[in-house]
Image: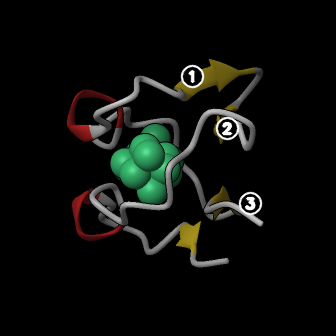
Amino acid sequence: MAYSINDNCTNCAACVPVCPVDCISEEGDKHVIDADTCIDCGACVPECPVDAIDEP
Ligand code: SF4
Ligand code: SF4
């Protein structure tokens, strides 16, 4: 399992620059995490203003 982004996502993109493996991207009206690339570091979680990133 990897970190994942839920439907609370507002597409703000605040989480994108902090990801060390660049695995967060926009997809439609929200952002998504590529589970195969995510290294479960957790750096993105505190960046999200709406708590849209769920831990594995
Ligand atoms: S947990 Fe780390 S590697 Fe995974 S999406 Fe968040 S910042 Fe990127
Ligand atoms: S920081 Fe949160 S609301 Fe903004 S794009 Fe990332 S997951 Fe979505």
Q: CA distance from mark 1 to mark 2?
A: 6 Å
What is the x, y in percent for residue 2? Answer: 68, 60
State the mark number for residue 25: 1
**Does the Cβ of the disc 1 residue fall within 8 Å of ligand 2?**
no
Disc 3 marks which amino acid?
Asp
What is the x, y in percent for residue 1? Answer: 77, 66
N-terminal of the pair, mark 1 or mark 3, is 3
Disc 1 marks which amino acid?
Ser
State the mark number for residue 32: 2
What is the x, y in percent for residue 44? Answer: 33, 55
- Nearer the observer: mark 1 or 3; the answer is 1
- The residue at which mark 3 appears reads as 7
Question: Which residue is rendered at x = 49% and y = 61% of the image?
Answer: 40
N-terminal of the pair, mark 1 or mark 2, is 1
State the SS at label 2. strand
Question: Which residue is rendered at x = 39% and y = 28% of the image?
Answer: 21
Query: Do the CB atoms of the residues marked 1 and 3 lie less than 8 Å apart?
Result: no
Lateral position of residue 6 relative to residue 51, left or right: right
- For mark 1, does the 10 Å Cα neighbourhood hold few (<14), some (14 to 19), or many (20 or more) residues? some
Q: CA distance from mark 1 to mark 3?
A: 15 Å
Query: Do the CB atoms of the residues marked 1 and 2 lie less than 8 Å apart?
Result: yes
